[in-house]
Image (cartoon, rainbow, N blue to C red):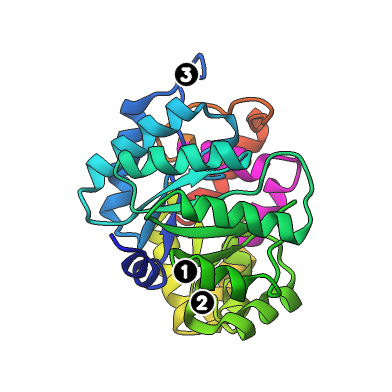
Amino acid sequence: MTPEELKAAIGGGLLSFPVTAFDARLELDEARYARNFEVVLEHAPAGIFVAGGTGEFFSLTPQEVQRLVRRSADMAQARVPVIAPVGMGTRLACELASQAEQSGADGLLLFPPYLTESDPAGLALHIEQVCAATRLGVIVYSRGNARVGAECLPALAERCPNLIGYKDGIGDIELMTRVYTTMGDRLTYVGGLPTAETFALPYLEMGVTTYSSAIFNFLPKWAKEFYAAVLRRDHAHVYREMREFVMPYTALRNRRRGYAVSIVKAGMRVVGRDAGGVRPPLTDLEAAEVEQLRALVGTRS
């Protein structure tokens, strides 16, 4: 898939990022991962982020990432774009980009650099070097210590024709408005905040036509219906589901740091597609919290 084809594809529908399945020893379980991947495919997302934030990219080895990307590309068979993760330091991110291209990925999601803060000029150079290391389309993830502002994007876009997307994980409305006003349709814009459904309607008005849904993992039908309601600006549907499901879900998610990932793994367990626990430094939900989630999911499954 060319960068322009990827740009068009991801902007046209809901995106999914499947969890990474582990066994009882927290080793990669490709068979269970593949079973969940098939369920995701059945519900036709516009793109699949493999081993992303919800897929615990931060806890995986480069070899594990490569295995997941290759398995996902083989299973997708070009039916849906497979977007691989790259990140950490610039050199490692470039190696992961090359590895993903060889493994059959259609595009890349560039995560923030590991640990250190950086000046905007250094961050721009980081993005540029990763784009230069691949022919694939690159989506930059503006989050944490990689706050990508409107001031650097025009020059970056000119130097990097394969920079095709901007994923927002900050939630700064002024920043997002400046980015869209500056770049227009040069980029595709993706909502990337935890439980992105919470922000979907207001972000749509800022040009963010899609988002990556973690809930898609365990309630794919609900996730697609909610997204459709957002696109048609069905406020009654959206705010009913926000009030009755999303807000109680996020209240449970907010009990501990890292639960934005852990609660998705718990949701998989609740619907009978157990993908194992989370790797440290994350922690799993307590048994009582899983039961609360079970009751909540039961109202929408």
What's the mark number on residue 237? 2
Question: Is residue 265 shown in magenta?
Answer: yes
First to last magenta residue range:
245-268
Query: Mark 2 or mark 3: which comes first in sequence?
Result: 3
Locate residue 228 relative to residue 94 in the image: left or right: left
Say what amino acid the circle numbered 2 marks.
His
Residue under numbered circle 3: 27
For label 2, the crowd category at 10 Å Cα-Cα, with few meaning under 14, some 14 to 19 and many 20 or more, is some
Q: Position of residue 285 (x, y in %)?
A: 65, 33
Of circles 1 and 3, which is in front?
3
Three-letter code, disc 1? Phe
Q: Residue furthest top?
A: 25
**Secondary element at tag 3:** loop
Q: Earlier in the sequence, mark 1 or mark 3?
A: 3
Which residue lies under the disc numbered 1?
A: 226
Q: Position of residue 205 (x, y in %)?
A: 59, 84
Instruction: Give the class, few, some or many, for how many residues have Cα within 10 Å of label 1's Cα (few <14, many ≥20).
Output: some
- The alpha-carbon separation of the residues under discs 2 and 3 comes to 40 Å
- Between discs 1 and 2, the one toward the N terminus: 1
Callout 1: SS:
helix
- Residue 245's image quarter? bottom right
Query: Looking at the picture, how far across and down is residue 232, in whole percent?
Result: 44, 84
- 3D distance between C-alphas at marks 1 and 3: 34 Å
Q: Nearer the viewer, residue 277 or 105?
A: 105
Of badges 1 and 2, the one in the foreground is 1
Q: Is residue 155 above or below residue 59?
A: below
